[in-house]
Structure formats: structure tokens, C-alpha cells
Image: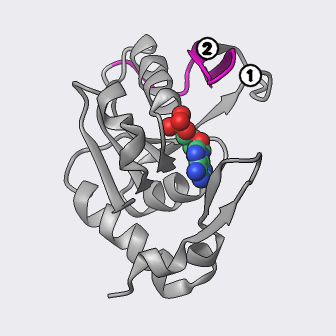
Amino acid sequence: MIDLKSKIRDVPDFPKPGILFKDITPLLGDVKAFQQVIDTLAKRYATRQIDYCVGIESRGFIFASALAYRIDAGFVPVRKKGKLPYTTRSVEYDLEYGTDKIEMHVDGVHPKSRVLVVDDLLATGGTAKATCELIEKSAGTVVECAFVVELEFLKGRDKLKGREVFSLIQY
Ligand code: AMP
């Protein structure tokens, strides 16, 4: 087994001063490490009857699509506002300063479908919470939210309380 933490690079002050960015590109570029991440997630979710892996723009797409392929689920993108071409539903969520909006196609997930939310990293949990709300607006069921990295000190789990949360690497 590879120590996945050794494949996450800290980049200080990116994209702005004071942020310690967790760069997952070394992990993605290492065939064994990337396989280990997808294999571990696939093992966890293979028998959970997941209909869709919903990936959060943009690094969430990488893990959600590879995982979807492995567990026989569809892949559905959740994107920042204005990027999806067809009719969308949207949810607004709070940022440190101001608000942002994420969107999903109205027919992205079907009513009563079982959905796994996937992103590279859980920080404050605002994006993942908004994604869960989007799925629920489409009458989908969020089975769990899965992250490669969790920044525990930002307490994203608290924001997602009442939902199942799983992460592979914690800081
Ligand atoms: P949040 O809504 O605060 O949980 O932020 C989660 C989103 O922001 C994820 O899509 C992450 O990719 C990104 N993100 C937030 N903080 C970091 C960080 N320190 N390093 C890398 N990505 C981050």
C-alpha cells in the first residue's frame, strides 16, 4: 500500500495568500497511487447500488468519473454557474465573502436514484452541502459524500451533518 499523503503536495499561498493548497496532481500522476484511491473507493461502494457518481467541478470530475466506470454508475457533473449547456437547477451557497452558485442539469439524476457525491477535498463543506441540496431538488437520494482529502480542522462534516461522509486522507 502506498502512503497517499506522500503524494499530496502542499502549495502555500495558492490561489491566494494564506491558503495552503493541497495539490493532488502528484497522486494522479502516480499510477499505483491513483489506482489505490479508485480501488479503495470502488470496494466501498461496489455493492451500495449507486446509480450516479456526482462529481464537483473540477477535480471532483477526475475521481467521480473513474469511480463511476468501476462501479457501473453514471457520471453527472455539478458545475459553477453558466457552464452547463442545458436547463439547470441551481443552489446558492455562502463563501468567505459573498455567495456562489452551482448547477446541475434538470435531468442529471433521476428521482429516487441513489447518488454518491465525489470531490477531491472537503474543506468547509459548503460546496458539498450545496451539491447534496441540488441532488435532493431532483428527488435523488444522497447515499454518501466521498472525498480523497479531508481538512478536519475546517469542520466540513459539521456542515454536512445528517449525511454520511467518508474520506481517505485526513489532515
Ligand atoms: P469547501 O466548500 O470549503 O468544502 O471547499 C471545497 C472545494 O474547494 C473543493 O472542490 C476543493 O477542491 C477546493 N478546496 C478548498 N480548500 C482547498 C485546499 N486547501 N486545497 C485544495 N483544494 C481546496
Magenta segment includes 94: yes
Could you say which disc has been placed on residue 104 in the image?
none
Q: Secondary structure at mark 2?
A: strand
Above or below residue 31? Residue 131 is: above
Magenta segment includes 78: no
Q: Which coloring applies here?
A: one colour
Residue 20 spot, x, y in % from top left: 62, 56
Q: Secondary structure at mark 1?
A: loop
Mark 2 in CB contact with mark 1 (< 8 angstroms): yes
Q: Amino acid at mark 1?
A: Lys
Q: Tell me the CA gap for discs 2 and 1.
A: 8 Å
Ligand 1 visible in quadrant: top right
How crowded pointer 2 is (Cα within 10 Å; few <14, some 14-19, many 20+) is rated as many
In depth, the one of 132 and 12 nearer the eye is 12
Write the start and end of the magenta stretch as one range.
Answer: 90-111
Q: Quadrant of residue 37?
A: bottom left
Q: Quadrant of residue 154?
A: top left
Please name the residue that numbered disc 1 is placed on.
81
Residue 144 spot, x, y in % from top left: 29, 39
Please name the residue that numbered disc 2 is placed on.
90
In depth, the one of 43 and 30 nearer the eye is 30
Instruction: Name the residue at 30% across, 29% down.
Output: 158
Let me know if residue 61 appears in the view.
no
Instruction: Name the residue at 39% across, 16% down.
Output: 136
Let me know if residue 71 appears in the view.
yes
In depth, the one of 49 and 125 nearer the eye is 125
- Left or right, residue 13 beside residue 91: right
Q: How many marks?
A: 2
Q: Quadrant of residue 52?
A: top left
Q: Amino acid at mark 2?
A: Ser
Instruction: Name the residue at 37% across, 18% down.
Output: 111
